[in-house]
Amino acid sequence: MLQPRRRRKPVGITLIEILTVTSIMSGLHSQSNFQYAINKANEVKGLSNLRQIHLLLQTQCIAGALPRAAFFPEGDPKKDPKSITRLIAGAPPQLFVSPFAPPSLQDKGLSYAWNTALNGRTLDTVPRTTWVLIDVTAFLVDPDIPKPGKYLVLYADGRAEAIAEPPADIVKSVREAQAKKAPVAPKKGASLPKPLPPRDPKGPAPNIPKIRLPGGQTVPMPPSVPGL
């Protein structure tokens, strides 16, 4: 007895399935989502590096005290003896470069500012919320230069965070520096000041804008970096 031939189920992928997968993948690989993933990965990497620095600072405090480092080296951070990169024993150089820093700062090998109020002290003698290291871009005075969306910061208690607004003491210091740097409009009828003659290289150094840190100490602004 002949049995009726069963109709075979079509083998393959339908057009609807292909279009569905295509729409999902195009959404996952959109520029915004892709950039978000990159930024998040950079943030995790930077925070991990700061936590490693904190562990090394803890070890240094056990043997003595925190280093007496510069706020930001005036010279080459890789060679300046007061650079924090040279004063933490056993710290790999890549720990001191924020993934969010522009290439010009990354090339310098240091993109964080050091809190000089901690020099010679130990971590257990300062408030837990004291910032230890923060992206140096948090100290930008020029309002016309765009600032990053987040700043990486390390606190005395070992917390590392990505924050949208710098700590209050930094914000206050930057505003004070901006007020001193802001040009004053000449009065009506007053003559404009004459341009200054070219500075003699052997003469005194020019007046560099400074930032006042907690405790009353003033430090020179970090050197201008192209792209910041």
Image: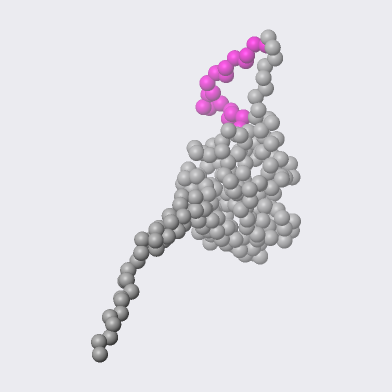
As for residue 206 lying within the magenta part, the answer is yes
Kindly identify the residue that appears in the image at 32 percent across and 71 percent down. Answer: 10
Left or right of 50 in this view: 38: left
Which quadrant of the view contains residue 168?
Answer: top right
Image coords of residue 182 (percent x, y): 65, 28
Quadrant of the drawing holding the N terminus = bottom left
Residue 181 position by quadrant: top right
Compared with 4, 211 (above or below) is above
Q: Which sits in the foreground, 166 or 33?
A: 33
Residue placed farthest to the bottom in the image? 1
Q: Nearer the viewer, residue 36 or 168?
A: 36
Count of numbered circles in the view: 0
Residue nearer the viewer, 112 or 1: 1
Displayed quadrant of residue 146: top right
Looking at the image, the residue that sits furthest to the front is: 1
Please state if 79 lies on the left or on the right of 2 as rendered. right
Residue with the most extreme top position: 189
Q: Residue at x 69, y 12 (%)?
A: 188
Residue 15 can be seen in this image: yes
Q: Is residue 215 left or right of residue 90?
A: right
Q: Residue at x 53, y 39 (%)?
A: 228
| Residue at 39% from the left image edge and 58% from the top image edge | 19
Q: What kind of secondary structure does the magenta stretch mostly adopt? A: loop
Q: Nearer the viewer, residue 120 or 32?
A: 32
Which stretch appears magenta? 190-208
Residue 134 within the segment the image draws in magenta:
no
Relative to residue 1, is residue 110 depicted above or below? above
